Amino acid sequence: TSSITNMAAVINNTPVSSSIVTSTRFTDEYDLKEELGKGAFSIVRRCIQKSTAQEFAAKIINTKKLSTRDHQKLEREARICRQLKHSNIVRLYDSIAEEGFHYLVFDLVTGGELFEDIVAREFYSEADASHCIQQVLEAVRHCHESNIVHRDLKPENLLLASKTKGAAVKLADFGLAIEVTGEQTQWYGFAGTPGYLSPEVLKKEPYGKPVDIWACGVILYILLVGYPPFWDEDQHRLYNQIKAGAYDYPSPEWDTVTIEAKRLIDSMLNINPSKRISAADALKHPWIYQRERVAGTIHRQETVDCLRKFNARRKLK
């Protein structure tokens, strides 16, 4: 739309200056409704597009309080989200800057967190875990094909489109995402969440797309047993565990998990990023691609019970 505005300005011989022309496009086009959540400098509210009566979620950022660096981060997040159009990614429909506020208009996702939904299910099996991680991997593959690395894959960022049974998993929060050049790696800075950080990030080595696959491996492990592969109250010890790739499959809970599931986890939790499986190849793995034939179908009550405790611990943080 900016090019159209500029054209009009050229025709009318009037200079375009943000100090003069303050957009009121958000206010003009959308009605704001109730609050859905809030952050340090932002608030998320439901909104309705007047022309279509369609519902969206508006992330409203108070730009008056942002540093230059935070401003750049906001621009980056909007630029990245704009490129990603996929059924398993929370979609950015619009980005509007007004005086003092920036509005990001997203898909309204109403199903809550995937992990919270799992613990409310009567039945949950390996095949269900396979279907969950498949959708996450589809989202990650799309990011990676678009040369975007999420850097903060974790349960909090896996949402469900709606409360309907079988609703799509949606990857959210691209606040830490970066743009990369193909398969090249470099040091993009220390970013992520402790239990999901890859060995290469902890070693402060060049990194790239494989960091997202490592986090997927951690998520898949949790999806199968309800607790994480790496855990220690002491962060230094936790980081040493991760750097060493020191995880295992303890009895009895792992005895009922198929060898294929473990092999897929092993290929994702390879401490050598160049040997780690890609999202595209993980999607071709028999445990995902031939789920009906390969993945276990017994109900995993212990996983659900463990996951409930894991969720409660996460909420305390």
Image (cartoon, rainbow, N blue to C red):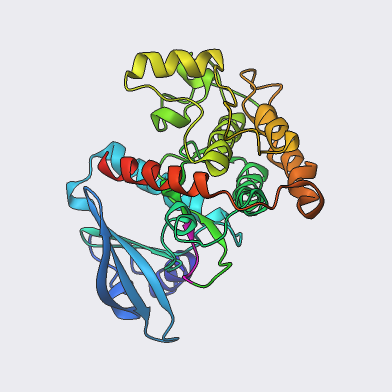
Whether residue 274 sits left or right of residue 96 in the image: it is right
86 vs 240, nearest the viewer: 240
Residue 174 seen in render: no
Q: Assess whether residue 162 is covered by the magenta stretch.
A: yes
| Percent x, y of residue 36 | 29, 65
Residue 291 seen in render: yes
Q: Which residues are magenta?
A: 159-163
The C terminus sits in image quarter: top left
Up/down of 56 relative to 69, above or below: below
| Percent x, y of residue 150 | 51, 41
| Percent x, y of residue 173 | 42, 49
Q: Which residue sits at x=62%, y=52%?
A: 125
The quadrant in which residue 240 appears is top left
Q: Assess whether residue 299 is covered by the magenta stretch.
A: no
The quadrant in which residue 131 appears is bottom right
Whether residue 11 sits left or right of residue 234 in the image: it is right
Residue lying farthest to the front in this orientation:
252
206 vs 21, nearest the viewer: 206
299 vs 209, nearest the viewer: 299
| Percent x, y of residue 124 | 58, 55
Up/down of 236 relative to 62, above or below: above
How many marks overall?
Answer: 0
What is the chief secondary structure element of the magenta stretch? loop
Whether residue 246 sits left or right of residue 67 in the image: it is right
The quadrant in which residue 277 appears is top right
Residue lying farthest to the left in this orientation:
65
305 vs 24, nearest the viewer: 305
Up/down of 146 relative to 187, above or below: below
